[in-house]
Image (cartoon, rainbow, N blue to C red):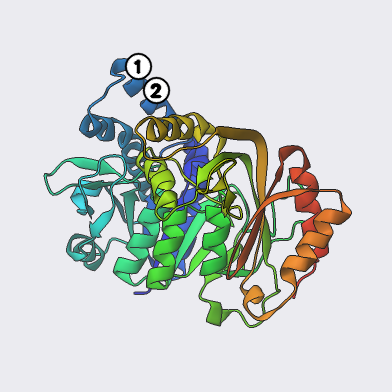
Amino acid sequence: MPLLVMKFGGTSVADLDRIRNAAAKVKAEVDRGYDVIVIVSAMSGKTNELVGWVNETSPLYDAREYDAVVSSGENVTAGLMALTLQEMDVPARSWQGWQVPIQTTSAHSAARFVDIPRANLDMKFAEGFKVAVIAGFQGVSPEGRITTLGRGGSDTTAVAFAAAFGAERCDIYTDVDGIYTTDPRITSKARKLEKISFEEMLELASLGAKVLQTRSVELAMRYKVRLRVLSSFDETDEQSGTLVCDEDEIMESKVVSGVAYSREEAKLTLVTVEDRPGIAAAIFGPLADSGVNVDMIVQNISEKAQGSDKPVTDMTFSCPVDQVARARKALEAARDAGHINYDTLEVDEDAAKVSVVGIGMRSHAGVAARMFRALAADGVNIKVIATSEIKISVLIDRKYMELAVQALHDAFELDKAG
């Protein structure tokens, strides 16, 4: 039998009526002749509630018990989904992570997949079961303890099962009907994409688009799992949603496919840093050790320090606003320890990052110039620039973020197909 993987997020299974709605979509695929593996998240809001209970009970909690508690939300949804399908005369059985078993590392709350053996599920499909409902976001460690994969882990679970079972496709059901050229809440001209490449989706996900979890896209790209993002609240068919696929499946691609943004960014500048071999490692090593997610980095031209022959420079980088205090502490500790020396640390917490992404940028010149002209025309000043093969990102004042997104969407005519 051909096999599909279908994943339903928390809003798609938020109550019994929505579980019935999701189950009806599963039944429709069974009626089309598919065996189906369904991955479910916890009902909307339940994981936050469980995390709150853990923190209230034990602020310095045991990570193993944390995973035991927070994974229970998916277990409830899986059982309810299987019961609902049975009421629809669809032979279904629910599975918790340890029953499959989904084998993971021992990194509690941030576990990674090691293996998904097929034998137990294959046996049930051979017995006549048509649907296996899997609790997402969880697995079992080599020590036999329940593990969780981190927030968004159910997306990764779905892609991992699709890869392990050679699924025809992995459908991710959410509260949006696909991937858009940018956030429709910012511009009404945003257009739903029919297809997008793995690389473009990975860039968009890492730059702030929250439709798919970054790890799930990385896994899909590695194993060539065709992903489809679609709404659980709309009538759907085989043409619905957005297909995330290999670049070879996209006949023609626009130069830029989408505009992404990250609102809560900060720009930090170390003023008058000694310019010597190893200084970058001395700065960014402590930041990495402290868990600061550094993004853009710019080093100024070296010059001689006043009254000295030693060359100095300024080092600028960006990070999320909520990591500024951690970054400041790490840099001050490195200075106190004598590993680095700088005059001051200047912090701008009112920044945002706006990016254009597109595989067409590989073969087209002038994208950066077009982007910068569009921003200049609307009076948007650029603080920092970073590029990759298929992406250009700029750091700007946060108050201009929405204006910049709209300007770039218009400049690259993303409201038009083809």
Q: Position of residue 88 (x, y in %)?
A: 42, 51
Indicate the quadrant containing the C terminus: top left, top right, bottom left or bottom right. Answer: bottom right
Say what amino acid the circle numbered 2 marks. Answer: Gly
Q: Would residue 157 be visible to someone looking at this image?
A: yes
Which residue sits at x=49%, y=47%?
294
Location of mark 1 (residue) = 56
Q: Is residue 195 above or below residue 82?
A: below
Quarter assignment of residue 148: top left
83 is higher (above) or lower (below) than 336: below
Find residue 48 and report its horizontal and vertical position in percent: 43, 29
The front one of 388 and 5 is: 388
Query: As drawn, which residue projects farthest toward the left?
Result: 143
Horizontal placement of 76 versus 296: left or right?
left
Q: Is residue 340 left or right of residue 414?
A: left
Tell me the quadrant of the picture where the N terminus can be found: bottom left
- Mark 1 and mark 2 in contact? Answer it, CB < 8 Å: yes
In the image, residue 344 lies at what x, y percent? 56, 32
Q: Residue furthest right?
A: 377
Q: Residues within 10 Å of mark 2 (few under 14, many from 20)?
A: some
Mark 2, secondary structure of its residue: helix
* Residue at x-position 60% and y-position 64%: 242
At label 1, the amino acid type is Glu
Disc 1 secondary structure class = helix
Residue tagged by mark 2?
A: 52
The front one of 56 and 294 is 294
Q: Is residue 120 left or right of residue 301?
A: left
Front-lying residue, 375 or 106: 375
> Where is 366 relative to 116, above or below?
below
